C-alpha cells in the first residue's frame, strides 16, 4: 500500500501575467518504509513537490492522498494536524528559532500536539541524534551539522510516518553530510519513510530509490541496483 | 495548545526585545496611571462636594435680600429684610423646625497686643444648629443675650488661635470694633475648604451687632429649617407669600428677596463633580488609547520581523488559532503588565497629590477595575489585528520570507 499517492499534480505560479509551471502533472507513489531521493537541476520543481507532499503548499490541480486521506479536501486545522503528526520537515537552512535552546526547538511540535511531557520527549529525541549534551545551547552556539541534527530531532520527535528533507546536506561539508545521512538511514531502518531532495550523487547513494525530475516532470524513477 | 504555554511563548517574545517592549508598555503605564490618578482627583472633588452638602444640611431654606435674578440688584444694598421677618415666618408658617437670622460685617478684633480682621457674624441662637456649628468649649449665644443686647462673643477656631494661641479664651475680654466683649465660647472647628474658612468668624448676638456695632436694621440671611425634605416646596411658597405681604410687593412684581433651597445647589454641585470626573477620566482614556496604538504598531513590526518564525511554527503543526493566540497574548501581556504597573503608579501619584498637593484624592475599587479592564480591552482591540495578520500568513510564504 502506498503511503503517499500523488496523481497528476501540477503547480502554476502566476505573477501578474507571467505564469510559471513548476510542476506539470506529476504522478508518484511512495510506499511505507521507502528511502527515496529526488534529484534534478536547479529550478526543476523539487522543492515545490516537497512542499506539496509536506502539506505546506497546495497543488494547482491534481490529487494527493496521504495515508489514503485526500489532502485537497482538508481544512486548515486538519492540515496543521497532518504537519504536526504525520510529517517531519527538514530544511536546507535548518529553520530553527534562534531565541530558543536546542531542546525548546525540539519541543515545538510537541507543544502544538498538546503533549504534557514535552521536555523529556524532546531530550530523548536529542539523544537519538546524539546531541543530548547540547540541549541548552542556542542555534548560534551550534555548528551547521549540529543545527541540522537538532532540526532532525524536531522532525522525528512526534514520531511521524514520513520525514521530508529538502537538501538537508546542502549547507554542510561531505563528512557532516554523511553523518546526517547515517541518521536518516537509522531512522528509515526503524520504519520511517524518508524522502530527500539532493543535488549530490553521493547523498543519493544512501537511498534505495532515486527519482529524477526535469522541468516539473519525472524523468526517471529507479530502484538501487537497477542502474 | 495549553494556555499557559501560550503565555510562556508570549513572555519569550516580549523578553526578546526588552527595551522595545518596555517602551511600548510605558504608553500603557502612563495611560492607566493617568486614568487612576485623574479619577482619584475627580472622586476627591466629589467627596468634598458631598461633605459640604452634609455641612449645609438638605432641608434648609435660606432667604436673602435682593431679587432671585442674578445681577438684578446688588445684594448688600437691599436692606429690607429684617429680624422681624424671621419672627413673622416662625409664627406664621407651619412645617418649620427652626428659624434664625444673621448678618455679617468685617471688623477688627483685638486681645492684648494681638489683633485680626474677621467676619463678625451677628445672629440668633438657632444659628448653631441650623448651620451645624456646635461649640467646643463654653456656650453659644442664647435668647437672653439677644434680648439684653449683651456684648458677648463666640469665637471661631481660627480667630481663637490668632488671639489666644493655645491659651484659654472663654471668660476673657476682647475688643470688637473698639468695644469690649466677653468671650463666652469657642466653636468647634469645621476645617477650611479650598475656597473659604468657616472657622474665621466671631459670632455675637444679632441685636448687639445691629444696635451697638454697625447701627443697621437689616439681616443678610434668614435660615429656615423645614421639618422634612418633602415639605420644602410648600414651606417655600408660604414664606414667599408671607414676605410679599409684609414687604408690600404687588402681585407680578419682582420680590426684594429670594428664597433658595439647597436641592438645586446640591444637584448642580454633584453634577459638577461628576462632569469633572468624566472629563478627567476621558482625557486619561485618550492617553491610554494612544498607548494602545503604540502596542498595535509594535505588534505589527513584531509580526513582520518574525514572519519566518511563524512559518516554522506552522510547518511543525501550529494552527492559525495558535499563532493568533500567541500574538494576542503577547499584546495582552504588554497591556496588562503595563496596566498593573500603571495602577500602582497612578495610586502613588494620587497619594502624592493628596499628601503634597493639598487636594483630596480618592481611589475607588471601581476606578482600579475600570483601568484594569480597560487595559485588557486595549490589548484586545489593538492586538487582534496584528495577531490576525500573523495567523493568516501562508506557511510556505512565511518560511521563504527574508
Ligand atoms: N513562490 C514562487 N513564485 C513564483 N515562482 C516560483 C516560486 N517558487 C518557485 N518558483 C518557480 O518554480 C520553479 C521550481 O522551483 P523549485 O523551488 O521547486 O525548484 P528546485 O528544484 O527546488 O530548485 P533548487 O534546486 O534550486 O532548490 C522555478 O522555476 C521557480 O522559479
Ligand atoms: Mg529547492
Image: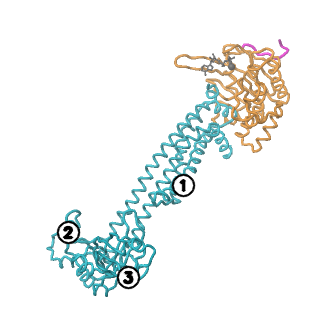
Q: Is residue B2 magenta?
A: no
Q: Upstream in the sequence, badge 1 or badge 3? A: 3
Question: Can you give x and y, in whole percent of width and height, for residue B372 in the image?
Answer: 54, 52
- Which residue corresponds to mark 3? B184
Q: Quadrant of residue A217?
A: top right
Question: Can you give x and y, in whole percent of width and height, for residue A44 in the image?
Answer: 67, 15
Q: Upstream in the sequence, badge 3 or badge 2? A: 2
Inter-mark Cα distance, 3 to 2? 32 Å
Query: Which tint is chain B?
Result: cyan
Q: Is residue A53 among the parts visible in the rendering?
A: yes
Q: Upstream in the sequence, badge 2 or badge 1? A: 2
Q: Quadrant of residue B358?
A: bottom left
Is A71 on the left-hand or right-hand side of B126? right
Mark 2 or mark 1, whichever is nearer to me? 2
- Which residue corresponds to mark 2? B77
Q: Callout 3: residue from which chain? A: B
On whether disc 1 and disc 3 are found on a single subunit, the reply is: yes
First to last magenta residue range: A219-227
Is A34 on the left-hand or right-hand side of B172? right
Vertical comparison of A27 with A99: above or below: above
Inter-mark Cα distance, 2 to 1? 50 Å
Which mark, by number, is residue B348?
1
Amino acid at each position: 500500500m502506498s503511503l503517499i499517492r500523488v496523481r497528476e499534480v501540477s503547480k502554476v505560479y502566476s505573477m501578474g501575467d507571467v505564469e510559471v509551471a513548476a510542476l506539470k502533472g506529476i504522478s508518484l507513489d511512495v510506499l511505507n518504509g521507502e528511502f527515496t531521493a529526488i534529484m534534478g537541476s536547479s529550478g526543476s520543481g523539487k522543492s515545490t513537490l516537497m512542499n506539496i507532499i509536506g502539506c505546506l503548499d497546495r497543488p494547482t490541480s491534481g490529487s494527493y492522498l496521504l495515508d489514503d486521506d485526500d489532502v485537497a479536501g482538508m481544512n486548515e486545522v486538519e492540515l496543521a494536524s497532518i504537519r504536526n503528526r504525520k510529517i517531519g520537515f527538514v530544511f536546507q537552512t535548518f529553520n530553527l528559532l534562534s531565541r530558543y535552546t536546542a531542546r525548546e526547538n525540539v519541543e515545538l511540535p510537541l507543544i502544538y500536539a498538546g503533549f504534557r511531557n514535552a521536555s523529556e520527549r524532546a531530550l530523548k529525541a536529542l539523544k537519538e541524534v546524539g546531541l543530548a549534551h547540547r540541549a541548552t545551547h542556542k542555534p548560534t552556539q551550534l555548528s551547521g551539522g549540529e543545527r541540522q541534527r537538532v532540526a532532525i530531532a524536531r522532525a522525528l520527535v512526534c514520531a511521524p510516518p514520513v520525514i521530508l528533507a529538502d537538501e538537508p546536506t546542502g549547507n554542510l561539508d561531505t563528512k557532516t553530510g554523511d553523518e546526517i545521512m547515517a541518521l536518516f538511514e537509522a531512522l528509515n531502518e526503524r520504519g520511517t519513510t524518508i524522502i530527500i531532495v539532493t543535488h549530490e550523487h553521493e547523498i543519493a547513494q544512501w537511498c534505495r530509490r532515486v527519482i529524477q525530475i526535469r522541468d516539473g516532470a519525472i524523468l526517471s524513477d529507479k530502484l538501487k541496483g537497477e542502474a | 495548545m495549553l494556555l499557559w504555554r501560550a503565555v510562556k511563548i508570549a513572555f519569550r517574545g516580549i523578553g526578546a526585545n526588552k527595551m522595545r517592549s518596555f517602551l511600548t508598555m510605558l504608553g500603557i503605564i502612563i495611560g492607566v496611571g493617568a486614568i487612576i490618578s485623574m479619577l482619584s482627583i475627580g472622586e476627591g472633588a466629589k467627596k468634598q462636594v458631598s461633605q459640604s452638602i452634609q455641612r449645609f444640611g438638605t432641608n434648609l431654606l435660606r432667604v436673602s435680600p435682593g431679587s432671585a435674578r442674578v445681577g438684578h440688584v446688588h445684594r448688600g444694598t437691599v436692606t429690607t429684610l429684617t429680624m422681624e421677618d424671621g419672627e413673622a415666618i416662625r409664627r406664621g408658617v407651619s412645617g418649620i423646625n427652626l428659624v434664625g437670622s444673621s448678618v455679617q460685617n468685617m471688623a477688627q478684633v483685638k486681645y492684648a497686643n494681638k489683633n485680626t480682621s474677621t467676619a463678625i457674624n451677628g445672629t440668633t441662637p438657632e444659628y448653631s444648629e441650623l448651620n451645624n456649628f456646635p461649640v467646643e468649649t463654653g456656650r453659644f449665644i442664647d435668647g437672653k443675650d439677644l434680648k439684653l443686647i449683651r456684648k458677648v462673643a463666640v469665637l471661631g477656631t481660627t480667630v481663637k488661635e490668632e488671639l489666644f494661641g493655645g491659651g484659654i479664651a472663654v471668660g476673657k475680654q476682647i475688643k470688637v470694633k473698639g468695644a469690649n466683649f466677653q468671650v463666652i465660647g469657642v466653636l468647634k472647628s469645621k476645617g477650611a475648604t479650598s475656597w473659604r474658612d468657616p472657622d474665621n468668624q466671631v459670632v455675637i448676638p444679632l441685636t448687639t451687632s445691629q444696635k451697638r456695632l454697625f447701627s443697621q436694621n437689616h439681616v443678610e440671611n434668614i435660615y429656615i429649617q423645614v421639618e422634612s425634605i418633602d415639605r420644602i416646596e410648600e414651606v417655600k411658597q408660604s414664606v414667599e407669600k408671607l414676605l410679599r405681604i409684609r414687604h408690600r410687593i404687588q402681585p407680578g412684581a419682582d420680590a426684594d428677596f429670594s428664597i433658595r433651597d439647597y436641592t438645586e445647589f446640591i444637584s448642580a454641585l454633584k453634577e459638577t463633580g461628576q462632569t469633572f470626573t468624566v472629563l478627567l477620566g476621558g482625557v486619561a482614556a485618550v492617553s491610554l488609547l494612544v498607548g494602545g496604538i503604540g502596542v498595535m504598531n509594535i505588534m505589527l513590526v513584531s509580526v513582520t520581523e518574525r514572519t519566518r518564525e511563524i512559518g516554522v511554527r506552522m510547518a511543525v503543526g501550529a494552527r492559525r488559532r495558535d499563532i493568533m493566540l500567541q500574538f494576542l497574548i503577547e499584546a495582552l501581556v504588554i497591556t496588562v503588565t503595563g496596566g498593573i504597573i500603571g495602577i500602582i503608579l497612578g495610586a502613588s501619584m494620587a497619594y502624592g497629590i493628596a499628601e503634597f498637593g493639598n487636594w483630596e484624592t480618592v481611589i475607588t475599587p471601581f476606578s482600579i477595575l475600570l483601568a484594569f479592564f480597560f487595559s485588557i480591552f486595549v490589548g484586545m482591540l489593538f492586538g487582534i489585528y496584528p495577531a490576525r495578520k500573523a495567523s493568516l500568513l501562508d506557511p510556505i510564504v512565511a518560511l521563504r520570507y527574508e
